[in-house]
Amino acid sequence: MPTARVHHLAEGVDLVLPRTFRASIEDVWAAITEPERTARWFGPWEGEGAPGRTIQVRMLFEEGEPWYPLRIDACEPPRRLAVSSTDESGGWRMELRLVSHGETTELQLVHHLDSIDPIPDAGPGWEYYLDLLMAAFEGTPQPDFADYHPALVPYFQELAGKPAS
């Protein structure tokens, strides 16, 4: 079930995907920042994890498990991690924001976009990765990407205000 919403801004849009964990903010922070924990849902990383530095992330859930450069733009433990990257398809910026609510922690993945165009392709992928994180956190079976793409594309086309193709 998709959870994303879109916020239209003066300069672009934010694709926002939330998840709620029955865990402390510190535990969720560790799951999104420690290499041995990120390996369970995204991929391990190497390098100096500090603002202004670029780390290498091994994309374990992508074909060929490629290494991918990821620049750390901001790191404010345990509340905010901002990253960006540039590849053959262009550049992108993302934030992971955490808020503690007593015994639960809300995580918001915010993908900053210049336009609505990438939403139908990016949305299903982020839903998948966040569900991988939930599965890793809860010790439940990993989801299958085939359940997300192309199945969720119509939802994200509608969210982007684009007619279904």
Image: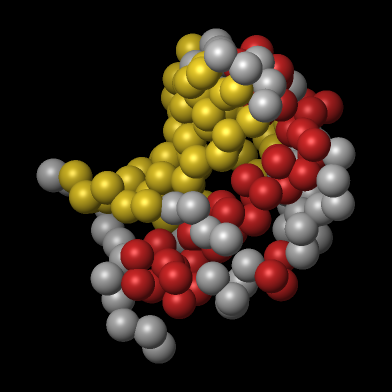
Does residue 3 appear left or right of residue 7 in this picture?
Answer: right
Q: Quadrant of residue 43?
A: top right
User: Residue at 45% across / 77% down in the picture?
Assistant: 154
User: Residue at 67% across / 26% down in the picture?
Assistant: 22
Residue situated in front as seen by the camera: 21 or 118: 21
> Compared with residue 95, is residue 155 higher up or lower down, i.e. above or below?
below
Residue 24 visible? The answer is yes
Looking at the figure, which quarter contains the C terminus? bottom left
Does residue 5 appear left or right of residue 3 in this picture?
Answer: left
> Compared with residue 122, is residue 29 higher up or lower down, i.e. above or below?
above
Direction bottom: furthest residue? 165
> Compared with residue 84, is residue 36 higher up or lower down, i.e. above or below?
above
User: Residue at 60% across / 23% down in the picture?
Assistant: 104
Q: Quadrant of residue 28?
A: top right
User: Residue at 35% across / 72% down in the picture?
Assistant: 158
Residue situated in front as seen by the camera: 47 or 80: 80
Q: Position of residue 18 (x, y in %)?
A: 50, 41
Q: Quadrant of residue 147?
A: bottom right
Q: How is the image coloured?
A: secondary structure
Q: Position of residue 69 (x, y in %)?
A: 61, 39
Residue 46 visible? The answer is no
Q: Position of residue 71 (x, y in %)?
A: 52, 31
Direction front: furthest residue? 103
Residue situated in front as seen by the camera: 21 or 59: 21
Residue situated in front as seen by the camera: 52 or 59: 59
Looking at the figure, which quarter contains the N terminus? bottom right
Does residue 3 appear left or right of residue 143 in this picture?
Answer: left
